[in-house]
Image: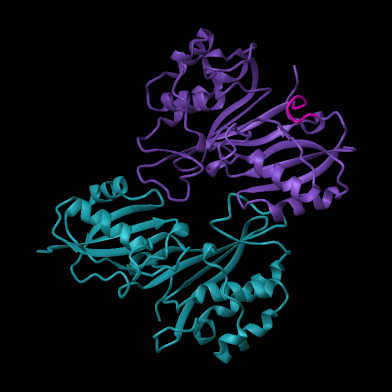
Chain colours: A cyan, B purple
């Protein structure tokens, strides 16, 4: 009798995991396995959790969202604390709430915010190595800042999708795509949209890095998007720079106008 | 023929190391071993490096200073880059300069800046776990801020020194000791002085945390210092919160008045 659906907001350092999703090989550690194991220890139930976005191996999250059905009576305000006492230190449940029975983390998401972080300095940083992509040659800041704007809007993003996806519709809307430099030599690409194709943020990041290197002109980006050809876009930036920051469900706290 | 003395500024994530200093058991990885190995690969010389402050296992540095004699002709401006191509990613040489032959990283240091970082939140943070001491019960911010001032001045710090030291003189001068809260729930203890006893910063941090927990009143700290009794001070805070930020050598860039 699963008489309740619970939603967690979860943060994790993805460095040591083979991505969010349970792998065919049970020896490969995943975020999903760790969460399900902790839930089982607490509730004595074998649950299968659903998440908002299946992050790849090495990708991080500050605001991943998961949901599952349970008959547990652990109160919302204690559920996350009980989980954190069981989870490894690289995974934390930020909060827990009981949601309506039909809630689905992925299908009901209005939009997501991803951040890709780049450390651009001739000297590597021991403290940023797991959370940024370290690039030594100086990137052209202005060219990257200008290039980021090209991605905003509703486009067919076929050129920014890795092969091997089963998706049929490649049209997505990007509301916000901006690069900032919060500290000298640290670039943050913040991208918010209604959905993301497989590796889409990492290919956009890699393409903007190619812009920063002078391999691609910012003015070419519009045509690269229109081409729908993966080969014309840049390389896929490595996973450790990527973090899922937030998922929006509630129109009330949603900063964009849904089209 | 060692005809040149070179000084490096070194940053490292101490998580995986048994401290800075080479251990009797050569299987235990240390920062010193890694640096000497990279220097040997570059110069073909077996050097013994000297450092400004021998950090313990798990302690980090952003501005450790080391020096060594070499006959290598690698130019200063390329030495650190060559080192970084050989070092593991958790150690980086920030810069390299040739100094006068008598320079000594430890004996010539005018002062040092250490920072101890505390993450005080009911929810643990996967991203701060290696670089802060995570404490869940809410600490009394105002009491800790007030308590930090007690350490400023020239004192016998016997009460804040771990047993087993060969030091005879326990008098040190602390120029600056302040706790700030740069982000909500993150406390930083910044402490600058002319020298530090074994575990001194970690015992001061642990004592101020006991102040934050209400176990010690800020007004008691002066008497605890005067007592010179280790048992009256607080616990030793764990290593991962500690970082050696900077070492001063040159009176020109030195922010304090030397007494």
| Residue A7: percent from left, percent from top | 27, 61
Camera-nearest residue between A28 and B173:
A28
Quadrant where the image shows the N terminus of chain B = top right
Q: Which residues are magenta?
A: B104-109
Question: Is residue B108 shown in magenta?
Answer: yes
Q: Is residue A150 something that shows in the picture?
A: yes
Camera-nearest residue between A191 and A53:
A53
A240 to the left or right of A138: left
Q: Is residue B62 something that shows in the picture?
A: no
Is the residue B126 above or below the residue B213 in the image? below
| Residue A44: percent from left, percent from top | 16, 55
Is the residue A168 above or below the residue A17 in the image? below
- Which residue is the extreme one toward the left? A1
Residue at horizontal 55 percent and vertical 22 percent from the top: B149
Is the residue A168 above or below the residue B49 in the image? below
| Residue A234: percent from left, percent from top | 62, 79
Residue at horizontal 70 percent and vertical 69 percent from the top: A142
| Residue A168: percent from left, percent from top | 40, 89
Camera-nearest residue between A149 and B52:
B52
Figure quadrant of residue A185? bottom right
- Give the main secondary structure, helix, strand or loop, of the magenta stretch: loop
- Which residue is the extreme one toward the bottom? A227
Camera-nearest residue between A127 and A193:
A127
Residue at horizontal 57 percent and vertical 29 percent from the top: B178
């Amino acid at each position: 009798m699963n008489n309740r659906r619970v939603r967690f907001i979860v943060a994790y350092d993805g460095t040591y995991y083979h991505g969010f999703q349970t792998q065919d090989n049970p020896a490969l550690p995943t975020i999903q396995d760790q969460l399900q194991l902790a839930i089982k220890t607490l509730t004595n139930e074998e649950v299968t959790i659903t998440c908002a976005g299946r992050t790849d191996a090495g990708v991080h999250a500050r605001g991943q969202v998961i949901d599952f059905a349970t008959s547990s009576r652990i109160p919302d305000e204690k559920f996350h604390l009980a989980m954190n006492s069981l989870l490894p230190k690289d995974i934390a449940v930020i909060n827990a709430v009981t949601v309506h029975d039909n809630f689905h983390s992925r299908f009901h998401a209005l939009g997501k915010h991803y951040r890709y972080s780049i450390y651009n300095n001739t000297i590597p940083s021991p403290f940023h190595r797991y959370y940024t992509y370290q690039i030594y040659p100086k990137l052209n800041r202005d060219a990257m800042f200008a290039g980021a704007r090209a991605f905003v809007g509703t486009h067919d993003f076929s050129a920014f999708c890795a092969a091997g996806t089963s998706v049929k519709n490649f049209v997505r809307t990007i509301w916000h795509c901006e690069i900032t430099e919060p500290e000298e030599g640290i670039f943050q690409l913040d991208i918010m949209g209604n959905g993301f194709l497989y590796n889409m943020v990492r290919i956009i990041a890699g393409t903007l890095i190619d812009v920063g290197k002078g391999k691609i002109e910012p003015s070419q980006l519009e045509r690269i998007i229109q081409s729908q050809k993966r080969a014309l876009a840049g390389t896929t930036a490595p996973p450790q720079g990527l973090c899922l920051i937030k998922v929006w469900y509630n129109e009330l706290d949603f900063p964009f106008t849904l089209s």
